[in-house]
Amino acid sequence: MTAHTPGRPAFRPGPPAARRPLPQDPSPQPCRPGASPERGELVRPLTRRQIDDRMEELGELYTHTSSSEPGLLGASDADRCTAFRQRLAGHVRRPGFELLVAEAVGSSGARALTACAYGFPLRGAGPWWQGLHEWLPENLFRAAALGRLFAIADIMVERRVRTQDQSREWNLAGRLQRRLLGDHTDALGVTLVDRGDADAYQALLAWGWRCVPAGTRGTALLASRRLLVLR
């Protein structure tokens, strides 16, 4: 994100007799460098055509912000990018799919992609996301049958967003996930996180997600992952 530092206010000193000593601040507060993501980055949705046009850029963002997936350990960035783009291309076709990007606007007006999040509603009558129906507790299975689950499949943000100011209202990941769920007020957000990805798990907890015990059906299929929910 581009830091926006306010310039010094211009002033002209008066004659010596008119000058007064400036009051001293008894407790100066330390200033954090840079602007908050809410001021510095614009969050907006992309249409499916825009996603197609920016697929390469989205793939580069993914390789820059994500850790290696368990099935792709040792894979090159190109291989990881290709796997992500194939996965995203499949998700885009789901009914109700939504994708948001965050962009930093430079001094020239050019926009740089800094973050992305996307998801889709889960419907009991439709295809399930990564075998999730085999792992849901009974109460969430009923919610899915009623169309009240929204899967947030990925949140791609820089490491500073995952580790700094996680609980702030203006945290970029928090803004993205709230915006995705904003049009689904009756829905519960759900996501899966690899058990070996401690950084992602701790960040999700800080952003308001809660871990849910697995259901009894087919839990061994997804034993390497945790199910989290967000209201």
Image: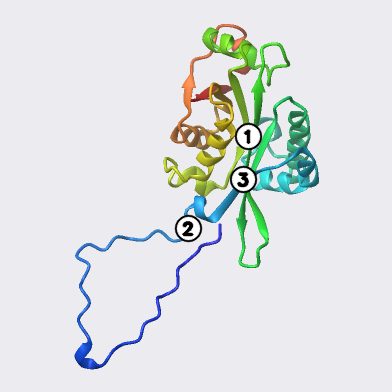
Along the viewing direction, whichever of 211 and 114 lies nearer the viewer:
114
Q: Provide residue 102's location: percent of width, then percent of height.
A: 61, 48
Looking at the figure, which quarter contains the N terminus?
bottom right
Does label 3 or label 1 sit earlier along the sequence?
3
Mark nearest the camera among 3 and 1 is: 1
Q: Provide residue 155's location: percent of width, then percent of height.
A: 60, 37
Along the viewing direction, whichever of 137 and 182 lies nearer the viewer:
182
Residue 197 lies, with reference to residue 217, above or below; the image says below
Residue 92 lies, with reference to residue 113, above or below; the image says above
Q: Provide residue 153's location: percent of width, then percent of height.
A: 64, 30
Q: Could you say which disc has been placed on residue 104 in the image?
A: none
Does label 1 or label 2 sit earlier along the sequence?
2
Question: Is residue 22 rendered to the left or right of residue 224?
Answer: left
Mark nearest the camera among 3 and 2 is: 2
Does label 3 or label 2 sit earlier along the sequence?
2
Q: Residue at x 67, y 47 (%)?
A: 61
The amino acid type found where label 3 is placed reads Thr
Q: Check disc 3 and report its element: helix, strand or loop.
A: helix
Q: Could you say which disc has been placed on residue 35 in the image?
A: 2
Q: Residues within 10 Å of mark 2 (few under 14, many from 20)?
A: some
| 3 and 1 marks in contact (CB < 8 Å) | no
Residue 64 lies, with reference to residue 228, above or below; the image says below
Q: Which residue is mark 1?
A: 154
Q: Check disc 2 and report its element: helix, strand or loop.
A: loop
Q: Residue at x 73, y 49 (%)?
A: 57
Q: Check disc 1 and report its element: helix, strand or loop.
A: strand
The amino acid type found where label 1 is placed reads Asp
